[in-house]
């Protein structure tokens, strides 16, 4: 398989593409995926890159603990718990009339400290890495061996005040990068489109972030913001699409989850497979987490990304092998979704190319399903998630219900091991959403 050879024409006769164009539920298996051992040899990142990110976050833990007292209980490590949602599993089984073998857990990134979304992993890491690089380069930080609590000092804040961090976003990326950037003392500018939620703008402003609202062409405005930022040596642009640091920040979740499951006595090996269902926008968070998990568990972890049927950019990029050369609009797919964190019409090029060797598969879900499960999760488990964060919930039902999922289990010799399986849906955000907004989300799904 040579990924550099681009197909000259999009094959609209392809059955998967046809179903995507009809907004059908697709459960897709990555047939070309090599074993982890093979994939690891040619990947653009190695285990050393993951370890480097882990070490950096460990160095910054004393600073984070001091600057954000809510992280005291985890000693400055930004991490989330896992919840058993076996009652919700019954809801899935009843709704889809299917038996889900194995247990179902929810990874609670909706409760991640500081920013309340999965972006707190990647975006905060990226800002910290920039801060460390600057401080070392300019000599304010003598070495990586000192206690990083010093990053909370007035001297460091004054140093960073001369530098700028710029983000273009409609939401959660800006919150994570903005809050951490402002705390370190940076001048932070977040460009937002007019339709971005008011509470997000208010929250950022309360942290001293300069929020610029663009009414007309948001994409153009961000492009200008990027150019200005890149021309200024004292400015840094947080780039959702091309940033390898953002990606590496997410990879750390792999070894952390393993540690967590080890503590709970949850075994993962050939006879006890682990299945992950990860909401996917540009691809950085599901990609990075999958990459980290494969380094922790090899082929015994099975990772599926989850996308709205109305904006399946990763699935289109992988199935056509055209990655970021195609957008959903090329296929007359309308891109309209309520799951705002996943509203990405074109996937990230480097993430999708890398992950074509690591993702086991992916699926699409309907707007009505997402709305329903948001409401039902509150009813059954009292867990309020934001719309994007529920995309991983129906994954286990699709795995057992679809013929593609059944075939996957068979071909991988897993069919008779599923009683021992652990399924984890990754909840990617929710705790920062104001109550009135959450009530609105709840009402939308109440009749479905
Ligand atoms: C950004 C985001 C995602 C998806 O992450 P990507 O890196 O864009 O794929 C999922 N859920 C929420 C809540 C998000 O904010």
Image (cartoon, rainbow, N blue to C red):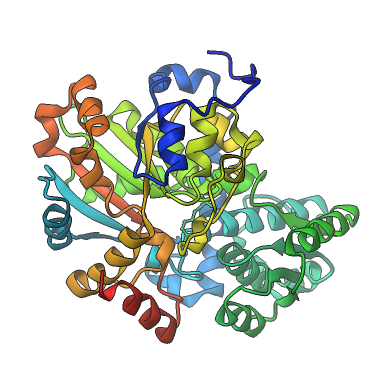
Q: Quadrant of the C terminus?
A: bottom left
* x and y percentages locating residue 229 in the rendered image: 84, 58
Residue nearest the observer in this picture, 386 or 326: 326
Residue at 20 percent of width and 43 percent of height: 422
| Image vertical order of residue 440 relative to residue 233, above or below | below
Q: Residue 5 occupies which quadrant of the picture?
A: top right
Residue nearest the observer in this picture, 271 or 55: 271
Residue 105 seen: yes
Residue nearest the observer in this picture, 182 or 370: 370
Residue at 57 percent of width and 37 percent of height: 351
Total labels drawn = 0
Residue at 29 percent of width and 55 percent of height: 393
| Image vertical order of residue 3 relative to residue 143, above or below | above
* x and y percentages locating residue 341 in the rendered image: 51, 60
- Give the left or right position of residue 181, taking residue 308 as reference: right
* x and y percentages locating residue 105 in the rendered image: 23, 54
Q: Residue 273 occupies which quadrant of the picture?
A: top left
Name of the residue lying farthest toward the top:
1
- Give the left or right position of residue 118, taking residue 125 as reference: left
* x and y percentages locating residue 85 in the rendered image: 18, 60
Q: Residue 299 occupies which quadrant of the picture?
A: top left
Residue 46 seen: no
- Give the left or right position of residue 33, taking residue 91 as reference: right
Residue at 52 percent of width and 13 percent of height: 1
| Image vertical order of residue 369 relative to residue 24, above or below | below
């Amino acid at each position: 398989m040579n990924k550099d050879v681009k197909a000259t024409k999009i094959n609209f006769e392809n059955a998967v593409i046809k179903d995507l164009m009809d907004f059908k539920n697709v459960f897709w298996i990555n047939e070309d995926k090599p074993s982890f051992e093979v994939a690891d040899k040619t990947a653009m990142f190695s285990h050393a890159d993951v370890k480097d990110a882990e070490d950096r976050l460990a160095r910054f833990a004393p600073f984070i603990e001091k600057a954000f007292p809510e992280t005291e209980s985890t000693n400055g490590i930004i991490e989330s718990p896992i919840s058993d949602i076996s009652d919700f599993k019954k809801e899935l089984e009843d709704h889809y009339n299917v038996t889900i073998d194995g247990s179902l857990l929810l990874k609670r990134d909706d409760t991640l400290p500081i920013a309340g979304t999965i972006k707190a992993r990647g975006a905060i890491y990226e800002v910290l890495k920039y801060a460390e690089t600057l401080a070392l380069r300019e000599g304010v930080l003598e070495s990586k061996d000192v206690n990083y609590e010093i990053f909370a000092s007035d001297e460091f804040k004054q140093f960073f005040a001369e530098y700028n961090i710029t983000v273009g976003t409609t939401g959660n990326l800006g919150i994570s990068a903005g809050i951490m950037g402002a705390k370190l003392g940076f001048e932070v500018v977040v460009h937002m489109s007019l339709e971005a939620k008011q509470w997000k703008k208010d929250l950022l402003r309360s942290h001293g972030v300069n929020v610029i609202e663009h009414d007309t062409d948001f994409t153009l405005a961000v492009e200008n913001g990027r150019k200005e930022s890149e021309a200024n040596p004292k400015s840094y642009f947080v780039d959702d699409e091309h940033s390898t640091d953002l990606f590496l920040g997410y990879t750390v979740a792999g070894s952390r989850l393993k540690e967590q499951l080890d503590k709970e006595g949850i075994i993962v090996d050939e006879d006890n497979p682990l299945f992950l269902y990860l909401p996917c926008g540009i691809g950085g968070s599901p990609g990075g987490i999958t990459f980290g998990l494969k380094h922790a568990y090899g082929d015994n972890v099975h990772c599926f990304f989850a996308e709205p049927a109305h904006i399946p950019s990763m699935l289109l990029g992988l199935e056509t092998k055209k990655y970021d050369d195609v957008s959903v609009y090329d296929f007359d797919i309308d891109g309209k979704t309520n799951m705002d964190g996943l509203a990405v019409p074109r996937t990230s090029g480097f993430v999708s190319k890398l992950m074509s060797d690591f993702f086991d598969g992916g699926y699409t879900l309907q707007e009505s399903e997402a709305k329903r499960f948001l409401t039902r999760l509150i009813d059954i488990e009292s867990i309020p998630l934001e719309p994007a964060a529920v995309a991983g919930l129906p994954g286990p039902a699709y795995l057992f219900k679809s013929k593609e999922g059944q075939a996957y289990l068979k071909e991988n010799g897993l069919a008779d091991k599923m009683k021992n399986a652990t399924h984890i849906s990754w909840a990617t955000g929710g705790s920062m959403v104001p109550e009135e907004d959450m009530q609105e989300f709840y009402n939308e799904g109440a009749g479905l």
